[in-house]
Image (cartoon, rainbow, N blue to C red):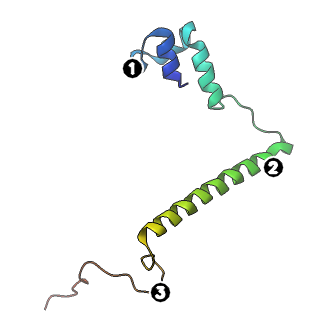
Amino acid sequence: MFLWAEVRKETGRGKSRWKIQDLFADQRCSQAVVNFLMAKYVGRTAPAVGEVADVASEVSEWELRDRREREEEREVEAAALGPGDEAGDGEEPRCSFPPPVHGTG
């Protein structure tokens, strides 16, 4: 659950009705704040020297997943364009406006 949804549930007051110092001071909100901070990895210690490889592998896995998603999006766009509409198919791209005129007279 989101921080502000939990706060509203516990106190009946929405986001715009709080100052940050009051949010931290109100005991009814403490668990919501703790849950939010844990979800955002606030206060998490840096990995030990031996664990650096694990962090790098997590990053590379994320990058691979992101790359795959982008490739899938390109494939869907290419399929929507149809055959021969993709850039780089050997034809010059068609220009929808006239070429610029150089010089005046």
- Distance of label 2 from label 1 (alpha carbons): 43 Å
Label 3 – label 2 distance at C-alpha: 44 Å
Residue at 43 percent across and 15 percent down: it is 18
From where the camera sits, is residue 21 visible? no
Instruction: Report helix, strand or loop for mark 1.
Output: helix
Disc 2 element: helix
Q: Judge by depth and name the residue closer to the eye, 47 or 13.
A: 13
- The residue mark sitting in front, 3 or 1, is 3
Which quadrant is home to the C terminus? Answer: bottom left
**Residue occupying the far left of the picture:** 105
Q: Are marks 3 and 1 in contact (CB under 8 Å)?
A: no
Work out which residue is located at the far right of the displayed protein and give it.
50
Q: Tell me the crowding category of disc 2: few under 14, some 14 to 19, or many 20 or more residues within 10 angstroms, Cα based.
A: few
Q: Which mark is residue 90?
A: 3
Q: Amino acid at mark 1?
A: Ser
Give the vertical position of 59 relative to 79 (above or below): above
Image vertical order of residue 51 relative to residue 104, above or below: above
* Residue 102 located left or right of residue 59: left
Placement of 95 over or under 27, stated as above or below: below
Q: Position of residue 41 (x, y in %)?
A: 66, 32
- Where's residue 52, x and y in %? 80, 46
**What residue does disc 2 label?**
53
In this rendering, the label closer to the viewer, 3 or 2: 3
**Which dot marks residue 16?**
1
N-terminal-most mark, 2 or 1 = 1
**Amino acid on which the number 2 mark rests in the picture:** Ala
- Please give the name of the residue rendered at 43% of the width and 20% of the height, measured from the top-left corner: 15
Q: Amino acid at mark 3?
A: Gly
Label 2 with label 1: CB-CB less than 8 Å: no
